[in-house]
Amino acid sequence: MSISLQPLLPHLPAWLLVLFRLTGMFVFAPVFGSQAIAGRIKVFMALGLSFCIYPTLLAPGSASAPLVLPIVNGGLSLWSLVPVVAMELLIGLVIGYGASLPLIGVQIAGRVVDQQMGLGLAGIINPEFNAQTGIVSEFLFMMALAVFVILGGHRVMLAILVGSFSKIPLAGMWVDGHLLDLVIGMLVTVFDLALRVSAPVLCLIFLETVAMGFIARTVPQMNILSIGFALRIMVGAILLIGTVSIKNQVVIEAFRQTFGSLSKFFNL
């Protein structure tokens, strides 16, 4: 008794588009796009998720079924394959990159604080991006990544991507002003988050620098250079530890705002 795969061949183009949309998310998305995860593991995860998602799109009563069936019945022409694949990848990239922007904002804030505290040369490896980063930057990044997992950000990303099939059909993505507004709005959120996270430490270091300047003018015999560096690191570390809970609230707000923008764009 032989098993024929002929009935599955009409579903191959539509399933591949689902796979490409998922693949775009695995490039930049937190956790899913981590450089610490081997490439073959990401491939198997994308394949497994596509096998789980595609049947739900064809379920009776599903809002995405009328949008998927035309591709199953009519297929895709060879000339339209490249732009269609690019647009499907773009959807996954927008979702994954948008979810990672708060983490990038926190890392920018950490780099600024590292420079002001005099820790710019004390670099360590960030396994998430496989790149060198500062001590404070890595600490804030790991804190934000833990907040992302605790909030269920990985599940929210998958929910947004699955829901995107009801708003944007397969091979139906377009680039217009709404997409540009979404990207610009999320970039503004990144710089706002970086400023809000780094501002307390920067303000305190500025006051410490002014105070050490007055002391240097008052007591010229004191070695302000050596004392100032140690005092700057100590003051910055104490303030970082004391404001961890406040930073967590700021990061949570940034993640919720980002996910809200993505959900609104994809009409969820």
Image (tube, rainbow, N blue to C red):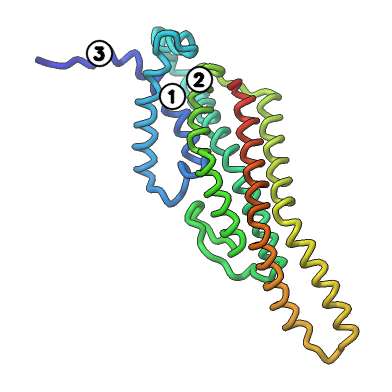
Q: Which residue is mark 2?
A: 165
> Where in the figure is residue 95, as x and y percent of width and height?
56, 33
Q: Nearer the viewer, mark 2 or mark 1?
A: 2
Task: Pick the quarter of the image with the C terminus.
Answer: top right
Question: From what the image shows, is residue 142 above or below residue 9?
Answer: below
Residue at mark 3 to residue at mark 1: CA–CA distance: 20 Å
Q: Residues within 10 Å of mark 3 (few under 14, many from 20)?
A: few
Mark before the other along the chain sequence, 2 or 1? 1
Question: From what the image shows, is residue 86 above or below residue 120?
Answer: above
Residue at point 57%, 39% (across, down): 99
Q: Which residue is mark 1?
A: 18
Residue at mark 2 to residue at mark 3: CA–CA distance: 26 Å
The amino acid on which the numbered mark 3 sits, given as a three-letter code, is Gln
Residue at mark 2 to residue at mark 1: CA–CA distance: 9 Å
Pick the front one: 11 or 201: 201
The amino acid on which the numbered mark 1 sits, given as a three-letter code, is Val
Residue at point 83%, 92% (across, down): 221
> Where in the figure is residue 253, as x and y percent of width and height?
66, 41
Question: From what the image shows, is residue 255 above or below residue 81?
Answer: below
Q: Which residue is mark 3?
A: 6
Pick the front one: 66 or 198: 198
